[in-house]
Structure formats: structure tokens, C-alpha cells
């Protein structure tokens, strides 16, 4: 258990030697670094969402929330003054509580990655956290967000901090003034990650929300994926439009998979989609489809260039391609029951699972994070995977997300999440959604 954040001599360059043998596959502790209003919590939440989506159990620990839970009523920036002994004591107490919860999550609850979201602006505090990681056998990776662009800082204050529980009873001007003073409380003691003093640490330093990066000592696969992800995200306002292809001939017959063309109503939807997109007047819109006939036919009606992605193809149902669910239940009763038991991890014979599909779609997520306005015309299972990422849905819910035909979902990233608008384009279609059934599997059946 962590009991003290004091009594550390940090006047010399940090030299770290592991106290416990850290295995290749040991847990990872991500430590955020930076002044307030630098996007640390934005990065923490996005990174946590991404890692959970790719199957790496991850949890965020926001020290500010621990402080709000302990001190119910925030008064002013004076709480953060370096000579405020009571405030300093409370903040240390909150940091210790968060670190103890980190230890419980990583060491007792089988968590793989913990994100410790706090300012951590001094070398002394970072050394303490690093030693905490060593003592518990964690790999520590620092993520520092540095902002010098006043417009970026001002935008972050407006988008995030003015809606904070700390300022519910304040005007925008009062909240902004107080928060700017809060930032000043940290500036004098702020020690940024240094290429010389911190040369033995693993870290990424992000300047002005992605203008440039400094990466140092990436030690393993997880850290590599974290760096790659963080170098792809941006905060430019944009919208992502997700929809399925128009109704297909096999949809009408209740059959899954295959590579059919559009039905009459599917073609009508394609025309309605073209009209809808034209009315939106979207700047520099990119259009992506799978390589399957039904998405291509839907995109053709738009009359604009589009890009085909093989990785956007529908989930491969293997031996069950072009069958109805009734036929699958009749011909493969055990497979049918096993899929109902764990739809996310179940893999069709000679086909794919939703878990496989998430791994296949990771490059699409990376590109969506890099891009601005995009329309993705895809398939039911694919759309569920993409939607689960943006809405932070767990694996158990992912295969049952509702993605009806002839409906466009407009996703607009906001401060700490995603705003969703569902637009039905008034063209009827069959319902292909199947609710989660009550699972009853005979004890005599064996996989």
C-alpha cells in the first residue's frame, strides 16, 4: 500500500532500477503529465476506450474526481495554492487513494492497464509514482501533454472546464478567471519531461495536441500501440456518418452473408442517402465502402469518389454463409447454441467471430481518428464494432447494438465522448436485428 508521497530526493537525474522482476507481460501503468487544461483527461478517456475496445482491460483513475468526491464543495483556485497546507494534504490523500485503487485493479482484479490521470507536474511526484510501479511489478509509461498555443488552451477551458462540477454555480467569466488562476498555481513548480534528466523513462510528449511528438524508450508491444494511437488522434471538429448498405436481396430472404445486390427498396435508400448527404453540405467528405456489391451499389448513387476497404467486408459466417438462422439452428444446433452463449467470442466454423472482426477493423479506427468528415457505408456486424468503439460499449453488448437498415448514425466527437444522432431516411426495410436470447445449453452437449 502507498503511504507517503514525500521524502524523495529528486535533485539529480532519475536513475531507476527495478525492485521486482518485471515480466514481459506485466501490467502497464500510464501516468499523465501536464498543466490543467492541456487535454490530459481527454487523452486518458480516449486511450482507455481504445485499449478496452481492442481487448486490453483498462481503467482510468482521475485524481480530480477523487478530490471532488472527498471535498463536496469547491470554493476557488486558492485550494491549489502551493502554500495551502490543507489543500496540499487533501490532494496528497486523493493521489494515494487513487494509487491504491490502481494497485488493486492491476494486482488483484486482473487489469492490464491503468491510466493515472493527474497533473504529476513535478519530477518528485513522478519518481514516487515510478517507484510505486517498480514495487508492484508494473511497467510505467508517461504521457505528457504540453500546450503553448493560447487558442488551444482557451478552447479546452470552454469545452471542458466550464462544464465541470467545480463551476456549476459560476458564470462563464467567473469560471474562466478562476481556472486560469488555478493553472498559475502549478506553473512555478512545473518540471516538464526532459530528454537528459528523464532519458531512462518511457514516455511520449505531445505538443499542442499533435503538432509534434517526442517519444522515448518504448519498451513493449502495448507501449508501441499506445504511441501509435496517440499519434493518430486529433481534436479538429468533425462528424463521422455510419450506415449500412441498402436492403439486399438476401436480406429479403432472411439469409446472412453472401455478396448479393440491392433490392428495389435498397436502391431507393441509396438515392435517399445521396439526397441526404447532399443536403448536409459536408466539407471535404470522404466516403468509404467495403468491397462487397451491396455497399458499392449504395455508394455509386452518391455520385462522388469513394474508397473500397476489404477490411470493411461483413463478418465471415464460414459454413453458414447465405443460410437463414432457422437453417443454422437445424443443421448446426450446437454451433447455434454456442453462438448464443457467447456471441462476441464465438467463431463460425471456417469463419470469424466479432472478436476477430474488431482486430480486423483496428486500421479503420486509426484512419477514422486521423480523418475529419467521413461516411462509412458498411455492414451490420462491422457497424456494431465501429459504434462500440465510439460509444465505449463493452464486448458483451457489442454484438447486440441496434444498427437498422436505411438509418444513418451521425457521430460527433465532444469533450469526453460522442454525440449520436439517428436519422431514418424514410425507406422501409426488413428488420435484421436479433435480440440477445436466454441461453439454455444442454449439459450433454460438448463443443
Image: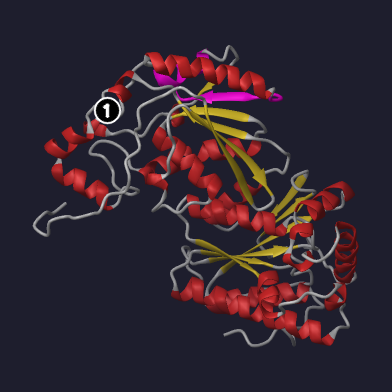
Left or right: 249 in relation to 63: left
Asked if 222 appears above or below 362 in the picture, the reply is below
In this image, 113 relative to 144: left or right?
Answer: left
Looking at the image, can residue 19 be seen?
Answer: no
Give the residue displayed 74% in from the left and 83% down from the top: 90
Q: Visible in this render: residue 127? A: yes
Q: Residues within 10 Å of mark 1 (few under 14, many from 20)?
A: some
Q: Magenta stretch?
A: 282-300
Mark 1 — residue? 254
- Measured as percent of width and height from the top left, residue 313 is found at 41, 29
Picture residue at 65% right of the left edge, 43% below the top: 413
Task: Name the residue nearer the viewer: 197 or 278.
Answer: 278
Q: Secondary structure at mark 1?
A: loop
Q: Where does residue 185 sit, x and y in percent of width and height? A: 88, 71
The colour scheme used to paint the residues is secondary structure
- Name the residue rendered at 58%, 58% in the picture: 219
- 288 magenta-colored: yes
Quarter residue 95 falls in: bottom right
Residue 244 painted magenta? no
Amino acid at each position: 500500500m502507498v503511504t507517503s508521497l514525500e521524502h524523495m530526493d529528486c535533485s539529480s537525474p532519475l536513475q531507476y532500477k527495478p525492485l521486482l522482476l518485471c515480466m514481459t507481460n506485466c501490467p502497464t501503468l500510464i501516468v499523465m503529465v501536464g498543466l490543467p487544461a492541456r487535454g490530459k483527461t481527454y487523452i486518458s478517456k480516449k486511450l482507455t476506450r481504445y485499449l478496452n475496445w481492442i481487448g486490453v482491460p483498462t481503467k482510468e483513475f482521475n485524481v480530480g474526481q477523487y478530490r471532488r468526491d472527498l471535498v463536496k464543495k469547491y470554493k476557488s483556485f486558492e485550494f491549489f495554492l502551493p502554500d495551502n497546507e490543507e489543500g496540499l494534504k487533501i490532494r496528497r490523500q486523493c493521489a494515494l487513494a487513487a494509487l491504491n485503487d490502481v494497485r488493486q485493479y492491476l494486482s488483484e482484479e486482473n487489469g492490464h492497464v491503468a491510466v493515472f490521470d493527474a497533473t504529476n507536474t513535478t519530477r518528485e511526484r513522478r519518481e514516487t509514482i515510478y517507484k510505486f510501479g517498480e514495487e508492484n511489478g508494473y511497467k510505467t509509461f508517461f504521457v505528457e501533454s504540453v500546450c503553448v498555443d493560447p487558442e488551444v488552451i482557451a478552447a479546452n477551458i470552454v469545452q471542458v472546464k466550464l462544464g465541470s462540477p467545480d463551476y456549476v454555480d459560476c458564470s462563464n467569466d467567473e469560471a474562466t478567471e478562476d481556472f486560469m488562476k488555478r493553472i498559475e498555481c502549478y506553473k512555478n513548480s512545473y518540471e516538464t519531461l526532459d530528454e537528459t534528466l528523464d532519458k531512462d523513462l518511457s514516455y511520449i510528449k505531445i505538443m499542442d495536441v499533435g503538432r509534434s511528438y517526442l517519444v522515448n524508450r518504448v519498451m513493449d508491444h502495448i507501449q508501441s500501440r499506445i504511441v501509435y494511437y496517440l499519434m493518430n488522434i486529433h481534436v479538429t471538429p468533425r462528424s463521422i456518418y455510419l450506415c449500412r448498405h441498402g436492403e439486399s436481396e438476401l436480406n429479403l430472404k432472411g439469409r446472412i452473408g453472401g455478396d448479393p445486390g440491392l433490392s428495389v427498396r435498397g436502391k431507393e435508400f441509396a438515392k435517399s442517402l445521396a439526397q441526404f448527404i447532399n443536403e448536409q453540405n459536408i466539407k471535404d467528405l470522404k466516403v468509404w465502402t467495403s468491397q462487397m456489391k451491396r455497399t458499392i451499389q449504395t455508394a455509386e448513387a452518391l455520385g462522388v469518389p469513394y474508397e473500397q476497404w476489404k477490411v470493411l467486408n461483413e463478418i465471415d459466417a464460414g459454413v453458414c454463409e447465405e443460410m437463414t438462422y432457422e437453417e443454422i439452428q437445424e443443421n448446426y444446433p450446437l454451433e447455434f447454441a454456442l453462438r448464443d452463449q457467447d456471441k462476441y467470442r464465438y467463431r463460425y466454423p471456417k469463419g470469424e467471430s466479432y472478436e476477430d472482426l474488431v482486430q480486423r477493423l483496428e486500421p479503420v479506427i486509426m484512419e477514422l481518428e486521423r480523418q475529419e468528415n467521413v461516411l462509412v457505408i458498411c455492414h451490420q456486424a462491422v457497424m456494431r464494432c465501429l459504434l462500440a468503439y465510439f460509444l465505449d460499449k463493452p464486448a458483451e453488448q457489442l454484438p447486440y447494438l441496434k444498427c437498422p437498415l436505411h438509418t444513418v448514425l451521425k457521430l460527433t466527437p465532444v469533450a469526453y465522448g460522442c454525440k449520436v444522432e439517428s436519422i431514418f431516411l424514410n425507406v422501409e426495410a426488413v428488420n435484421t436485428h436479433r435480440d440477445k436470447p436466454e441461453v439454455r445449453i444442454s449439459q450433454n452437449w460438448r463443443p
